[in-house]
Image (cartoon, rainbow, N blue to C red):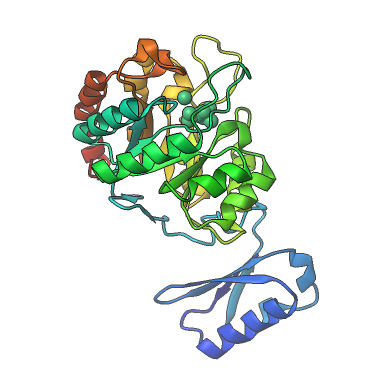
Amino acid sequence: MIIIMKPRACEASVQKVTNLIESKGLVVHLSKGDQVTIIGVVGDKAKLAGSNIEISDEVDKVVSVTESYKVANRKFHPEPTEIALQNTVLGPHTLTVMSGPCAIESREQLLETAFAVKKAGATVLRGGAYKPRTSPYSFQGLETEGLKYMKEAREATGLSVICEVTSAHAIEEAVRYVDMLQIGARNMQNFELLKEAGKTRLPILLKRGLSATIDEWLNAAEYIMSEGNENVALCERGIRTYETSTRNTLDLSAVPVLREKTHLPIIVDPSHATGVRAYVEPLAKAAVAAGADGLMIETHPCPEKALSDGPQSLTFDQFETLMGDLKPYAQLSGRTL
Ligand code: PEP
Ligand code: MN
């Protein structure tokens, strides 16, 4: 529920409404504009039955938010969220490119990739230390050793670094080494993991589940945010459809839909969406044109030898060319790259 106060409502009347809501055990999120104060109510609005807030002095209207996600909802927070990383801000003014290998395989591989993607203009280094592989016999990641290489790459290049976390233990480890945590597609509805991520103070990149609707995805973001961590970005990485010519189907319409429904930054990952190197470039351009705030693109020093996702990984030369080609798209979208 959202309570819109009358223009220039006084502090005392805002406080009166806030006190009433809190006395019922609900949580208040205040948004103060120049003219209008908006009070967001988080929790079961049934507890306010009989309170008749709408007839209070200086309340303009009470809007019922039908969506169950509230903190992530644009109706309550119209301004786009900006997430500050060590060297860039994820949000409406920049095109943030996150690049790196699917999996961290060695110190040399990661450092070489870090310097290459930085040279090409990426600001965030990605790399998996905990790999949620389809088969238990596939490479599972270097875990803490990989996180240490991430930290070293961060210090050597000044890039921000992001790693996927797959368990509460992985979160505990990763917060010591990285700038941003990724929750992968397979864990989008792992609610205990989402709550643990919400208890950290690191920004979270929440990837869309393999078959998740946008509503389910935003409710997953709400799980993180309702624990107090509001620095969440969303990553469209393709969904399961009947089409088999690509690994997944990139749902580009998710970009404008999310833009309407939420204030959270939107990243598009054309690498996992297609699984095919040749399709990464056109879809990266399309994502920027559709309004994405950033891209996640897999790169590898030698994709043929990659321990995971080689077929979709770009070489450094291909990545550099792509970054150059993206410049006019970023410019047209009013973003710096
Ligand atoms: C990844 O980013 O390496 C990954 C496993 O992605 P997703 O969760 O989107 O499959
Ligand atoms: Mn991958």
What is the quadrant of the N terminus in the image? bottom right
In depth, the one of 18 and 108 nearer the eye is 108
For image coordinates 49% across by 38% down, the residue present is 144
**Is residue 155 shown above or below 14?**
above
**Is residue 193 shown above or below 12?**
above
x and y percentages locating residue 48 in the rendered image: 76, 73
Q: Is residue 259 left or right of residue 61?
A: left
Confirm whether residue 291 shows in the render: no
In depth, the one of 261 and 97 nearer the eye is 97
**Is residue 49 shown above or below 20?**
above
x and y percentages locating residue 167 in the rendered image: 62, 41
x and y percentages locating residue 2 in the rendered image: 61, 66
In depth, the one of 125 and 169 nearer the eye is 169
x and y percentages locating residue 190 in the rendered image: 67, 40
Q: Is residue 27 left or right of residue 178?
A: right
For image coordinates 35% across by 30% down, the residue present is 107
What is the quadrant of the C terminus in the image? top left
Q: Is residue 331 left or right of residue 255?
A: left
Residue most toward the bottom?
Answer: 12
Where residue 71 sits, quadrant-wise, is bottom right
